[in-house]
Image: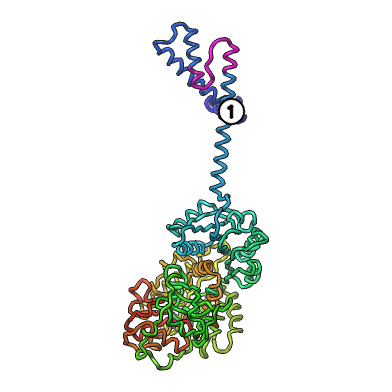
Amino acid sequence: MAQRRAPLGDRARYWFDSTLARGASAIVGWMALLCLAVVVPASAVVVWTDPDAPQSLPGRLAAVWHLTGETLRLGGATGAPLRVTMSVLLALVALLYVSTLVGLITTALTERLTALRRGRSTVLEHGHVVVLGWSEQVFTVVSELVAANANQRRAAVAVLADRDKTAMEEALSTKVGPVGRTRLICRSGPTTDPAVLTLTSPATAGVVLVLPRDEPDADAEVVKTLLALRAALPGEGAHPPVVAAVRDDRYRLAASLAAGPGGVVLESDTVTARLIVQAARRPGLSLVHQELLDFAGDEFYLVAEPTLTGRPFGDALLSYPTSSVVGIVRGDTPLLNPPPQTPLAEDDLLVVISRDDDTVWPADCADSVDKAAMASGPVTPARPERVLMLGWNRRAPLMVDQLRRRARPGSAVDVVSDGGEATVREVNEADAHHGTDLTLTLYPGDVTRPETLRGLDVHSYDSVIVLGQDPAPGQPPDEPDNRTLVTLLLLRRLEEASGRELPVVTELVDDRNRALAPLGPGADVIISGKLIGLLMAQISQNRHLAAVFEELFSADGTGIRLRPAGDYVLPGCETTFATVVAAARQRDECAIGYRSHDDASTSPGYGVRINPSKAGRRRWTADDEVIVVGRD
């Protein structure tokens, strides 16, 4: 049976494709034929329609050849065949030279643009901030650095991560917004390669920040990045300070050794657990932490004041009308809220809270103190606390340990989780170390089911901590927030049904989910990554603040507390904040602000006011709270 031949069009197309597949020579040949097929007929039409064209056929053909040569840059010379051939040869050489030169220039420009797009050029900056790694914290860190550099003329932030440069720039532009005077530079490449790290010029940087990725092996990569950074820096000369973060305490020592003697390594899980527990004990405390850690309001500064040398620390509390003194730094050791009679040495630095470093100016505020308005009764006694923990994750044992450290006899922590045998084992291990003052009980149950929460007397607890489960391998980092939002929605329904507000403290991973949480605007929401980003940004501006924050957020040391205003001033009295500072000094505390109960739902800061003017007067109520730095 005869085989049917393919259609002529298909065979022609196949033959054409086959010739193109032979290489560049075939492509050049086809382009030449195509050009001749268009140019020669068009030139003939132009010549034959020209009234001044030669009348003879050879003359017109010569004119067609001349016009074709000019169009294709082939010289177009006429005369002897040798002359025409040499003319064409010279034109081809010129064409080859020009096209090759254009091709080389185009290739070089394309490679250069590709390299710039890939972020492979070296950053030539001095005193800039280098951010190594990419996670949700990068947006907080860059935003805070932009705010801190708002009054700087030449500031730059260089971000290096193993991501596409354009994608990083678009993400930062979307989430950070306008950067003002700060130059934002992105470079692409692995942070564990010393050769790639040199693209950010770390040797000339003012500080280097190392961020952990949102993955299980992030801590090991942080250590490797720190080692690569040490290899990339020159062996001699001053190195920039390094600030890094790890999640697991097991990697902190290795990271500290890799960071060097001047490096600061934060343990994000421990810090997050401490702040959640502090907020659970004192509702509203997360709002104070937010105010102190970002650069939008008042923050910590270290200042020297020679005029106070030899005077007791208590005198410094009323020596700054627009700043709040909370301690001293002696050598490299912070002393927060030292006894008021502690004498100030010549080299001591005062730890103050102020709007900016140029707003710290001394002036005696003792005349603003109204002793008649100061309360003299005993401090409100502390009582045992009951905490309900809904959910369990890797930070939960740290929270139980924080609760145990300052537990009062009769305190209890009830855990509701469906985490299975692993959760039971971790709870039992935590229970074996909690001591006798704290009772730890596990109740199996799914906190996303209404019947589980209805079976609990949630209003009998002093605080409710809502935790998301650790993400499973392959899940997005913010996956735990989905279950947390469902639990919060069920708790909100219980609040509406009972008409009573629940003191809820929520841990979220993604800051974007804060707007979705069915909670009041002034509720305690801890965004773990954002808090660490704020801390790293603060320490990057002054590494001596690392020890201050370590003491401030420790479980056993001096920290930020919310006390009833009635412990300091008489309710109903109108008096100055200097009077509150003087009353707190009598109780060996440093008053730094207050939270107004009347403004809790209407003011932008939800009633929290940090570092008010000493001369500012207001009427104090029994529901107001004073923010102090002190001990329990």
List x then y, in percent, for residue 276.
49, 76
Residue 158's place in the image compared with 395, above or below, is above
Type of amino acid at the residue the image marks with label 1:
Tyr
- Local crowd size for mark 1, using a 10 Å CA cut-off: few (<14), some (14–19), many (≥20): few
Residue 259 located left or right of residue 79? right
Check disc 1 and report its element: helix, strand or loop.
helix
Q: Quadrant of the N terminus?
A: top right
Front position in the image: 555 or 349: 349
Residue 54: image quadrant is: top left
Look at the picture and state if 540 lies above or below 63: below
Seen from this angle, which residue lies furthest front?
307
Is 83 magenta? The answer is yes
- Looking at the image, residue 350 sits to the left or right of residue 257; the answer is left
Residue 440 place in picture, x, y as percent: 54, 84
| Percent coordinates x, y for residue 365 in the rendering | 39, 82
Between 480 and 291, the residue placed more toward the observer is 291
In this view, which residue lies farthest toward the bottom?
377
State the image quarter where residue 252 is shown.
bottom right
Q: Is residue 292 magenta?
A: no
Query: In this figure, which residue is indicated by the disc labeled 1?
Result: 97
Residue 448 in sight: no
Q: Residue 157 in the image: state x and y as whole percent.
A: 52, 58
Q: Specify whether residue 90 is in view.
A: yes
* Nearest to the observer: residue 348 or residue 445: 348
The span picked out in magenta is: 67-87
- The number of discs equals 1
